[in-house]
Amino acid sequence: MRRGVVAMAVAWAVVLGAARVGLARGEHEINDDQLEVEMARNRALAAYVARNGKPDLAESRELADRPPWDDHEVTLYYLGIRKEIGFARAWILGQPTVHLERYERPLSDADVAALWKRARHRPASKDVDPAPGSPPAAAGAAEHAEGAAPRAEAAAGPAERAEQAAQRAEAAASRLEAAAAEAEHAADRAEAASDAMETAVQTARRK
């Protein structure tokens, strides 16, 4: 009986602890209207969105490491350029007067594949004109051919990028399988050569 009570107490402690962790993080997706509100509060966030356009996905997360940080940060996900970037306000003299980019990190293929299901699926941006001072088309033909695949992937939508990532993984697995088969064939050939040499040695000894 006591063991049952102790087990139940431990189970409830785990459940409540998990609930507290979820509440502490306070992470939730925000829509375009809520993002506009956050942009009105944070000049750095507003300037970034004005330069780069609205993200594919935006979230609000509670911050536990304050002061001087505000009680939450806004995280933007740009799947086309594989970027996650967070913005927050810092309090100075009792006012959230400092508006900052808090962190930035690249998104992996797995991140993009997980996020695109929740993304707003905005139309992919069109190719921009070449920057001044870029090499002419004839001189940069090799570079263009070399970088065509990454640029095409960047212009694709999240679903296409996730599919391309899966295709790359499948191609890599196929290459590994082919390499393993080749190694096995090489081992068979080496074993056959060794057997032939041993047979020749034994035949020579009999003579």
Image (cartoon, helix red, strand yellow):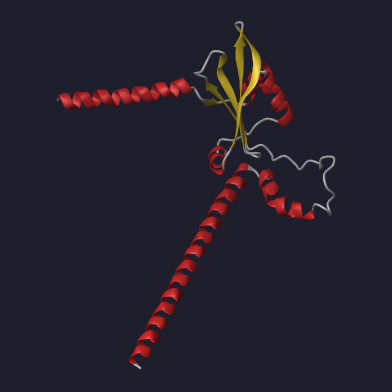
Query: Which quadrant would the N terminus be assigned to in this image?
Result: top left
Q: Pinpoint residue 102: horizontal percent, then vertical percent.
A: 61, 24
In the drawing, does residue 46 fall left or right of residue 7? right
Q: Which residue is at a point 34% across and 25% down the rendered structure image? A: 15
- Is 14 above or below relative to 158? above
- Residue 84: x and y in percent read 60, 32
Whether 14 is drawn above or below 66: the answer is below
Which residue is farthest top?
Answer: 93
Q: Quadrant of residue 3?
A: top left
What residue do we see at 68% from left, 51% from top?
Answer: 149
Q: Is residue 31 left or right of residue 131?
A: left
Residue at the location (45% across, 68% down)? 184
**Picture layout, residue 13 above or below residue 193:** above
Total numbered circles: 0
Q: Quadrant of the C terminus?
A: bottom left
* Residue drawn at the location 84% of the way across and 42% of the way down: 133
Q: Quadrant of residue 94?
A: top right
Q: Compared to 183, does 33 lie above or below? A: above
In this orientation, which residue lies closer to the viewer: 190 or 66? Answer: 190
Q: Residue furthest bottom?
A: 207
Q: Residue 144 placed where, x, y %?
A: 75, 52
Residue 205: give x, y in percent of width and height. 35, 89
